[in-house]
Image (spheres, grey):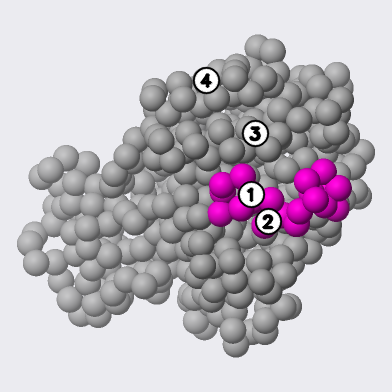
Amino acid sequence: MNDRTRTWIRNPKAAFTANGPDASGGLVISDGIIAEVLGAGQSPSQPCNEVFDARDHVLTPGLINTHHHFYQTLTRAWSPVANTPLFPWLKNLYPVWARLTPRDLELATTAALAELLLSGCTTAADHHYLFPDGLEDAIDIQVNVVRKLGMRAMLTRGSMSLGEDDGGLPPQSTVQDPDVILADSERLIDAYHERGDGAVIQIGLAPCSPFSVTEQLMRDSAVMAEKLDVRLHTHLAEALDEEEFCREMFGLRTVDYLESVGWLGPRTWLGHGIHLNDAEITRLGAAGTAVAHCPSSNMRLASGIARAVELEDAGSPVGIGVDGSASNDASNMIQEVRQALYLQRLRYGAETVTIERALGWATAGSASALGREDIGTLAPGKQADLALFRLDGLRFSGSHDPLAAMLLCGADRADRVMVGGQWRVIDGQIPGLDLEALIADHSAAAARLVSG
């Protein structure tokens, strides 16, 4: 979209702006930015040379995924782990993932991002922590795929440095030397990390978990993140096995451990954050440490129900994450919002966990978790990242409130998605992507990977 183009997304059926102004009259997009948000009956202040009639669509900010493992799309619904909790699930999958090749990762990342994009997601955070021989350039591969699909991404340089020989969970074949990890982390930040509004690629530091990295690597990562001004990410308080591991290995509960290595602060966002007591929630909130709530994965592995409402009320930004496609088995963001709505209602009730609150977690909340102020809401000056959902299928027949119907009736695919003013999904399709060929190649890679 050039400087002369002004696009009016006109009169949506319903609009959710995530703390933005009323947008029932639509949005005006100029040069990749939201120039105007129009209320009912309002028209653009200046002529627009493109108009999209959104009367059959529900308009939302682009959904933001705060926790994923793209490579895991190759091990969906693998029977040896279909009925296991976290630790045995990992132990069975580590050797399979250690066989990843660069082409495998390219296909897995493309499949994950395409599925996210088609479900209304415009920005995705990935936690990649596997770097077997030959896959040293894993993050570089992901950068290229993100750029091809025209999305935004927070790509975290994950790591594992504590193998079985030293009391950790992963096999030695999957761990790296800390000096190698830190040097590559700095390289990636220098090469790719963008700052400021409109950033497309950002890099974070993400030692995998308390049971797979050393305390020293956690401390060194915190120091580097402070020095280079990037964000920190890790798994924490996901399972009771992890809590027991921390007590035995470090003599600390998970949040105490987090503070001991210099991670308790607003630079950090955590994957899962389930098993927290009242005092720990208060501490996380006071520190501004964010949590990526991953409802489908938590249900799939029977890990527990995160205390998302209490975390948010305490001051922790709460975002939504689909988690890896081997513990969710999907990368669908709008469906994940529905799961968050229902799972959190089990804990807090329907009146507390509203449609708007759940959508807020996946938009403004997720943006805050990733440290971004330019995305996640529909307001003047924000990036023109948005999704449009049609409600014309049989599942929506008889529905009344369009916004409620989008979640309660189970929307699973966006009709249009815009990133930075550019249409990246049109009529439910990604322009330029041969989806059938991707599925064929991705499926073949998945079969090879699990066969050994």
Q: Earlier in the sequence, mark 3 or mark 4?
A: 4
The residue at the point 42 percent across, 28 percent down is 189
Image quadrant containing the C terminus: top right
What residue sits right under mark 1 in the picture? 260
The residue at the point 22 percent across, 72 percent down is 38
What residue sits right under mark 3 in the picture? 216
The residue at the point 25 percent across, 80 percent down is 40
| Residue 68 quadrant | top right
Magenta-colored span: 244-264
Tell me: residue 445, above or below residue 314.
Answer: above
Q: Are marks 2 and 1 in contact (CB under 8 Å)?
A: yes
Expressed as whole percent of the image width and height from the top left, the position of residue 225 reads 47, 38
Expressed as whole percent of the image width and height from the top left, the position of residue 155 reads 51, 36
Image quadrant containing the N terminus: top left
Query: Separation of disc 2 and disc 1 at Cα?
Result: 6 Å
Q: In this view, does 228 lie to the left or right of 366?
A: left
Which dot, 2 or 4, sits closer to the camera? 2
What residue sits right under mark 2 in the picture? 256
Q: Is mark 4 on a helix, strand or loop?
A: helix
Query: Separation of disc 3 and disc 4 at Cα?
Result: 15 Å
Q: Is residue 150 left or right of residue 429?
A: left
Tell me: residue 238, above or below residue 226.
Answer: below
Tell me: residue 222, above or below residue 241.
Answer: above
Is any part of residue 54 visible from this angle? no
What residue sits right under mark 4 in the picture? 183
Q: Are marks 1 and 4 in contact (CB under 8 Å)?
A: no
